Amino acid sequence: MSFQIAIDGPAGAGKSTIARKVSAELGFIYVDTGAMYRAMGLFFLDRKIDSRDLEKVKASLDDAVIELEIVDGVQHVILNGEDVSTRIRTEEAGMMASAVSAIGEVREKLVSMQQQIAASRSIVMDGRDIGTVVLPHAPLKIFLTAGVMVRAERRYKELLAKGQEPDLAAIAADIEKRDHQDMTRAVSPLKQAEDAILLDTSDMNIEEVTEAIIRLAKERL
Ligand code: DC
């Protein structure tokens, strides 16, 4: 029998780190849906299409072929044949992802892909609308959150480790802007599903959060 774990929450709450660990421990596959929105954002950035130009966005949507490949347990995102897994990890791609994710047609395309991937296999999927829209019947839904400055510091350290030269104040401002955009958009805004369990990770480390989720999953398996 397959089992789904939906993990939603704002930018920088630790969703991908936690989801990766939980999936590895349970032997489930892991899908990072934010990476799909980022690849879509990159597609429009590369084509120099403004996210506010809805006609152009909709007209070019079919030209974006996004695929997910799992290589040695690691998710790779392929955009029109190019592995963009590294290129999507910039603040610019994140902001563009947030902008284009507010467009209904973009969401329809990616949500149907995500539902196909999750059909009939055990999976941990993270994003913004997994518990509310993509997998509304998931037996375990987690809403992960943390204070803005805690999240900004985590993202700062992540980017530093990747060799980038981040600016903490700019990251905090981006996070607040992205939260606002993601929570106030008309289509599938970020919100906690009624049956989701809220975990505030401000004062928890990665191991504590991972263990808490695994315990909840085992109770339901
Ligand atoms: O999780 P992330 O920061 O990589 O996501 C980038 C953006 O994509 C995020 O600001 C909002 C959007 N997104 C979404 O709307 N729905 C999802 N399921 C995942 C991401």
Image (cartoon, rainbow, N blue to C red):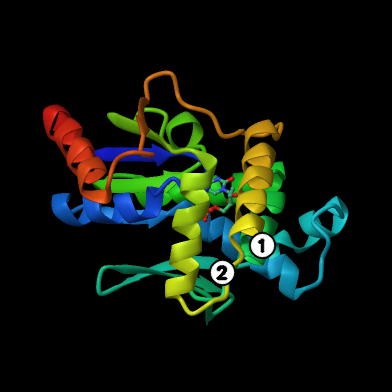
Q: Is residue 146 above or below residue 73?
A: above
Figure label count:
2
Q: Position of residue 114 (x, y in %)?
A: 45, 49
Observer-nearest of 104 and 21: 21
- Residue 71 is left or right of residue 148, and the answer is left
Mark 2 surroundings: few (<14), some (14-19) or many (≥20) residues within 10 A: many
Observer-nearest of 113 and 210: 210
Q: Is residue 99 above or below residue 201?
A: below
Q: Which residue is mark 2?
A: 88
User: What residue do we see at 67% from left, 34% from top?
Assistant: 187
Which amino acid type is shown beneath numbered disc 2? Ile
Observer-nearest of 118 and 194: 194
Q: Is mark 2 within 8 Å of ligand 1?
A: yes
Q: Is mark 1 within 8 Å of ligand 1?
A: yes
Most extreme residue toward the top is 194
Q: Which residue is mark 1?
A: 41
Q: Position of residue 41 (x, y in %)?
A: 66, 62
Q: CA distance from mark 2 to mark 1?
A: 8 Å
Q: Which quarter of the picture shows residue 87? A: bottom right
Tag 2, which secondary structure?
loop
Q: Is residue 148 above or below residue 193?
A: below
Q: Are marks 2 and 1 in contact (CB under 8 Å)?
A: yes
User: What residue do we see at 17% from left, 42% from top?
Assistant: 211
Quadrant where the N terminus lies?
top left
Observer-nearest of 81 and 25: 25
Tag 1, which secondary structure?
helix
Whether residue 48 can be seen here: yes
Q: Position of residue 28 (x, y in %)?
A: 22, 52
Which amino acid type is shown beneath numbered disc 1? Gly
- Residue 130 is left or right of residue 100, and the answer is left
Quadrant where the C terminus lies?
top left
Q: Position of residue 30 (x, y in %)?
A: 32, 55
